[in-house]
Image (cartoon, rainbow, N blue to C red):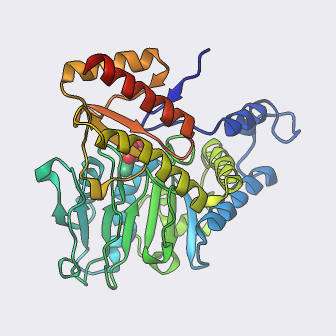
């Protein structure tokens, strides 16, 4: 089969070496004669997988002792409800602050409304989320339970290149589409969470990193499997964990350490995004969706002169082995998701294809 580069936004491509390890463990995990997905989450073999994944995550992020690393069911969106259930009770008013910088940010506050008093303090909806809205310290009520942001907006490609100062209000970030893609100071956050299906592994589960003092506030209605305090007490094994997702995540974390850690992958990510944005900026033929100062490195969204040309571009790209480049339906155009696992050669192949397409269809 000819080489295919997968630019899908998620579930997304994984490193090839990880796929090969999965293939092996699929049939025979560590010489046990049974598959990784056939063993109990209570075996010592799986426990080692879980503990090693948590330890490697800590290594990669220089995480302080007072943060917990939890694996929670249900992907990122499930946390949109779990967060207010676990944290709104920190304050009597149950006031929770949200910034709306894209579709998922909007969904986060929509889902939260059932469990807390949502206050959206800033939004860029009026310009179709082409930027991160400004948040100043005066906008943050100091009696709120938390401020929620979406640090990278998958559909558009915008990213917080600096984070709001929140005083005593815990800052919570949905990092689903950028976790471990750049160095960040975790101590500035009360909680960071991410669905696994982009920079970590399979879909349907999430990693939740939470500061210890924020535990213990879950409402009585919180389902046990969404209760972060219980997940911490049971070390993410309250019920049958998503063993496969945790196993794959563990392999991806090992791979990241082999790459030189987050600082090294950040450099690669910046270089990859630069290849595409330099090309976009060099011509009027391609137009970036996001204002330059808010560009991230994970999702590069752009348009061509007409929707007809975009349709042709996608068709020819698919035939050339450049897979899943269609922009999200709410934006249109093209979106190249270039997560940690995308090699530079994949990005260069796409850039070459873009040049050629422009030459032939300019
Ligand atoms: C930033 C962000 N948040 C939340 C989600 C929802 O994730 P899930 O489908 O795991 O619930 C996504 C999915 O792509 C996302 O990109």
Task: Residue at 33%, 47% (x, y): give it.
Answer: 157
Left or right: 109, with 82 as reference point: left
Q: Quadrant of the C terminus?
A: top left
The quadrant holding residue 260 is bottom right
Count of numbered tags:
0
Q: Nearer the viewer, residue 263 or 132?
A: 263
Task: Residue at 69%, 64% (x, y): give it.
Answer: 55
Q: Nearer the viewer, residue 344 or 257?
A: 344
Vertical placement of 158 versus 16: above or below?
below
Task: Residue at 81%, 39% (x, y): give it.
Answer: 29
Residue 259, horizontal then vertical, whole percent: 67, 52
Q: Nearer the viewer, residue 219 or 31?
A: 31
Vertical placement of 81 versus 86: above or below?
above
Q: Nearer the viewer, residue 152 or 64?
A: 152
Residue 92, horizontal then vertical, whole percent: 26, 81
The quadrant holding residue 57 is bottom right
Q: Is residue 284 visible?
A: yes
């Amino acid at each position: 089969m000819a080489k295919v580069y997968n630019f899908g936004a998620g579930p997304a491509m994984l490193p090839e070496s990880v796929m090969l390890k999965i293939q092996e463990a699929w049939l025979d995990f560590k010489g046990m004669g049974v598959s990784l997905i056939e063993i109990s989450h209570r075996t010592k073999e799986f426990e080692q997988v879980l503990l090693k994944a948590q330890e490697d995550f800590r290594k990669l992020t220089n995480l302080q002792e007072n943060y917990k690393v939890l694996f929670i069911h249900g992907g990122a969106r499930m946390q949109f409800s779990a967060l207010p259930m676990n944290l709104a009770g920190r304050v009597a008013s149950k006031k929770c602050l949200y910034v709306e910088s894209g579709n998922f940010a909007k969904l986060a506050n929509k889902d939260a409304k059932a469990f807390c008093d949502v206050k959206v303090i800033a939004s860029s909806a009026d310009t179709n989320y082409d930027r991160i809205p400004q948040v100043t310290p005066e906008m943050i009520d100091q009696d709120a339970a938390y401020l929620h942001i979406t640090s990278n907006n998958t559909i558009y490609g915008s990213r917080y290149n600096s984070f709001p100062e929140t005083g005593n209000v815990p800052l919570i970030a949905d990092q689903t589409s950028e976790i471990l893609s750049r160095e960040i100071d975790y101590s500035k956050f009360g909680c960071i969470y991410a669905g696994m299906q982009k920079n970590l592994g399979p879909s349907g589960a999430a990693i939740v990193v939470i500061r210890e003092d924020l535990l213990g506030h879950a409402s009585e209605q919180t389902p046990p499997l969404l209760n972060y305090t219980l997940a911490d007490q049971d070390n993410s094994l309250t019920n049958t964990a998503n063993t496969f997702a945790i196993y794959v995540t563990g392999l991806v974390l090992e791979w990241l350490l082999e790459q030189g850690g987050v600082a090294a992958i950040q450099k690669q990510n910046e270089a990859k995004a630069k290849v595409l944005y330099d090309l976009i900026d060099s011509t009027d033929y391609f137009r970036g969706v996001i204002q330059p100062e808010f560009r991230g490195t994970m999702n590069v969204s752009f348009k061509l002169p007409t929707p007809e040309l975009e349709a042709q571009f996608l068709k020819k790209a698919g035939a050339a082995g450049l897979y899943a480049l269609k922009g999200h339906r709410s934006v249109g155009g093209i979106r190249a998701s270039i997560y940690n696992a995308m090699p530079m050669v994949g990005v260069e192949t796409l850039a070459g294809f873009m040049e050629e397409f422009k030459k032939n269809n300019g």
